[in-house]
């Protein structure tokens, strides 16, 4: 579109601008006039209302979808962080318990040799109570079926297909469903 050199020159006037200005002027005159046809006025009001409602409804729907999406993202984030926090707590507990297992082994050996008396026995009982509270369970008793995932075999004295624990050199421990340490065993045939 070229700009007119002289705005007052009729040869250089923009016909689109003139028609838009005249339409606005006509609308202004019609609004100011009290002679407007009531049906025409109702049609104009309905047209304006129809054009505004989809815009407002569309905006409302869009904002509602945005809010639902953000709410779902936040709920997922909250669940994920809570799950990660709980897993972190369980890992930290299991690491501490693994550090205490050699002490339990020594106390068990002392009991087997008859050296567990007085304050040492009291210490062992308190430590076992703490382990029970943390749901730490020992496994690896002689005669149990051998499980390669839970038992570490250092020697296999069995000859058949069925294998059981013959001698337990070191007990294994579970904390809930988590394997803390495998049991060190010698495999034998069932008796």
Image (spheres, rainbow, N blue to C red):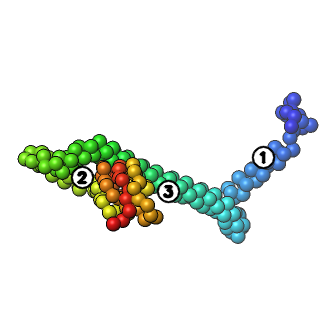
Please name whichever residue, 109 or 74, is drawn nearer the observer in this view of the structure. 109
Q: Few, some or many C-alpha atoms within 10 Å of disc 2 (few <14, some 14-19, many ≥20)?
A: some
| Label 1 with label 3: CB-CB less than 8 Å | no
Q: In this view, does 5 lie to the left or right of 178?
A: right
Please name whichever residue, 83 or 154, is drawn nearer the observer in this view of the structure. 154
Q: Establish if 43 lies above or below 82.
A: below
Q: Establish if 132 lies above or below 118.
A: below
Q: Is mark 2 on a helix, strand or loop?
A: helix
* Residue that numbered label 2 is attached to: 131
Residue ID at (70%, 67%): 43
- Tag 3 or tag 2, which sits nearer the N-term? 3
Cα separation, mark 1 vs mark 3, equals 50 Å
Cα separation, mark 2 vs mark 3, equals 39 Å
Residue ID at (19%, 54%): 129
Q: Residue 52 location in percent, x, y?
A: 64, 59
Residue ID at (53%, 55%): 69
Q: Residue 73 location in percent, x, y?
A: 50, 53
Q: Is residue 19 visible?
A: yes
Q: Which dot, 2 or 3, sits closer to the camera?
A: 2
Q: Residue furthest top?
A: 5
* Residue that numbered label 3 is attached to: 72
* Residue that numbered label 1 is attached to: 21
Quadrant in the picture for residue 39: bottom right
Please name whichever residue, 106 or 56, is drawn nearer the observer in this view of the structure. 106
Q: Residue 112 location in percent, x, y?
A: 18, 51
Q: Residue furthest bottom?
A: 39
Cα separation, mark 2 vs mark 1, equals 88 Å
């Amino acid at each position: 579109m070229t700009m007119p050199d002289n705005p007052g020159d009729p040869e250089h006037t923009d016909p689109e601008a003139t028609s838009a200005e005249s339409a606005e002027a006509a609308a202004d005159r019609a609004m100011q006039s009290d002679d407007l046809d009531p049906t025409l006025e109702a049609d104009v009001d309905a047209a304006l209302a129809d054009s505004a409602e989809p815009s407002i409804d569309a905006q409302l729907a869009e904002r509602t979808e945005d809010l639902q999406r953000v709410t779902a993202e936040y709920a997922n984030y909250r669940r994920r962080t809570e799950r990660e926090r709980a897993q972190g707590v369980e890992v930290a507990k299991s690491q501490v318990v693994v550090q205490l297992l050699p002490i339990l082994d020594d106390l068990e050996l002392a009991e087997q040799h008859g050296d567990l008396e007085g304050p040492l026995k009291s210490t062992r009982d308190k430590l076992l109570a703490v382990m029970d509270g943390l749901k730490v369970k020992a496994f690896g008793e002689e005669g149990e079926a051998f499980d390669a995932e839970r038992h570490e075999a250092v020697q296999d004295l069995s000859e058949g297909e069925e294998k059981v624990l013959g001698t337990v050199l070191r007990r294994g421990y579970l904390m809930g469903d988590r394997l803390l340490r495998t049991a060190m065993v010698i495999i034998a045939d069932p008796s």
